[in-house]
């Protein structure tokens, strides 16, 4: 890990329309590559472990990145845009994410992943660990409620923020020349990619922002619950070789996954991003069952044995 200081520009080169909320303005500066004394993690040949969980560079799927980072097409541009871009799929693969641990506003430790497309579009994913939307008025000021999220923006740039387990996730998107409505649709797609939950098509109009500024977002449904004695859709063994077998399972929403300690050492099933799903210590022969109720990807590990990891995907 190395430390590097970057100089923040005084303004963000985009529409001169003032953005609502100091935290929102500060976050959009990050879309121009600015942050205050971040600790950049060098990727080298092996991806580094995230310093903040969940990993901001693993939240958004490749398919969602491809969809939202394509340059705006003709019917998405604001009337004053000088040129129209043909409505064709992007020929570029999703850009790699650049991971930082930095500060955003009053929040000193934020996991951040920045994607810069060859087409000029940019996405910044922020993960604020162990906090809630209700405790972040500096960040949500000027945003309005949309289902389980807060959203706001102007032509070119926008932000959507929502609670995801014990963390708050903020997604800032810059499209350059896109209308607010087009930007809002892409923000909703991003949030749905992370949470597995659909959002209504949002509006970023000033009138709606003002009328809903104090609204409280609808909480996401629970990711799952512990059960006992139910038929398991998938079974995972915790082995003496210090591994989960299999390491990855997939179930439909409502499906049950059962873990069994089939070896001698004690294990556990720990979900950093969803601590409500975490088991206690499992000794030889112990079983642990979870019924998953929300679509998404749920990585977990055993805290007793580094490298002992697994994933549950809920469709």
Image (cartoon, helix red, strand yellow):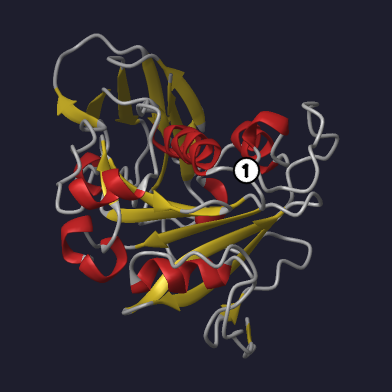
- Along the line of sight, which residue is nearer the eye, 157 or 223? 157
For the view shown, which residue lies furthest in the top direction?
231
Residue drawn at x 58%, y 62% is 15
Quadrant of residue 286 within the rendered picture: top left
Q: Name the residue under label 1.
A: 78
Residue 54, image x, y percentages: 42, 53
Secondary structure under badge 1? loop
Instruction: Report whether residue 253 is seen.
Output: yes
Query: Which quarter of the image is occupied by the C terminus?
Result: top left
Residue 78, image x, y percentages: 62, 43
Query: Which quarter of the image is occupied by the N terminus?
Result: bottom right
Residue drawn at x 64%, y 87% is 6
For the view shown, which residue lies furthest in the front direction?
80
Task: Determine whether 192 is above or below 175 in the image.
Answer: above
Q: Is residue 159 left or right of residue 90?
A: left
The number of numbered badges drawn on the structure is: 1
Instruction: Report whether residue 51 is seen.
Output: no
Residue 296, image x, y percentages: 41, 30
The crowding category of the residue bearing disc 1, from other C-alpha atoms within 10 Å (few below 14, some 14 to 19, many at least 20), is: some
Residue drawn at x 66%, y 49% is 177
- Along the line of sight, which residue is nearer the eye, 33 or 107? 33
Task: Determine whether 305 is above or below 112 in the image.
Answer: above
Residue 91, image x, y percentages: 85, 34
- Along the line of sight, which residue is nearer the eye, 142 or 298? 142
Residue drawn at x 33%, y 46% is 271
Task: Determine whether 275 is above or below 246 in the image.
Answer: below
């Amino acid at each position: 890990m190395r430390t590097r200081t970057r100089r923040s520009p005084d303004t963000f080169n985009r529409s001169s329309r003032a953005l609502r909320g100091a935290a929102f303005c500060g976050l959009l500066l990050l879309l121009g590559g600015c942050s205050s004394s971040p600790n950049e993690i060098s990727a080298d040949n092996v991806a580094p472990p995230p310093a903040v969980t969940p990993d901001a560079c693993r939240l958004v799927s490749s398919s969602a990145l491809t969809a939202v980072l394509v340059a705006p097409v003709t019917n998405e541009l604001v009337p004053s845009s000088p040129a129209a871009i043909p409505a064709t799929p992007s020929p570029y693969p999703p850009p790699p994410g650049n991971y930082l641990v930095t500060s955003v506003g009053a929040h000193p430790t934020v996991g951040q992943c920045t994607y810069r497309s060859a087409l000029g579009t940019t996405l910044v994913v922020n993960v604020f660990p162990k906090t809630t939307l209700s405790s972040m008025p500096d960040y949500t000021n000027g945003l309005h409620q949309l289902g389980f999220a807060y959203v706001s923006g102007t032509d070119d740039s926008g932000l959507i923020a929502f609670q995801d387990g014990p963390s708050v996730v903020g997604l800032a998107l810059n499209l350059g020349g896109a209308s607010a409505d087009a930007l809002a649709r892409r923000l909703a797609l991003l949030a749905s990619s992370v949470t597995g939950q659909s959002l209504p098509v949002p509006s970023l109009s000033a009138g709606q922002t003002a009328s809903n500024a104090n609204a409280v977002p609808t909480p996401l449904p629970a990711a799952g619950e512990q059960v006992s004695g139910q038929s398991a859709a998938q079974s995972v063994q915790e082995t003496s070789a210090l591994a989960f077998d299999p390491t990855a399972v997939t179930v439909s929403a409502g499906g049950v996954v059962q873990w069994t300690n089939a070896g001698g050492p004690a294990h556990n099933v720990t979900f950093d991003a969803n601590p409500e799903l975490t088991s206690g210590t499992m000794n030889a022969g112990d079983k642990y069952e979870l019924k998953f109720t929300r679509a998404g990807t749920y990585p977990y590990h055993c805290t007793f044995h580094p490298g002992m990891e697994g994933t549950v995907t809920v469709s």
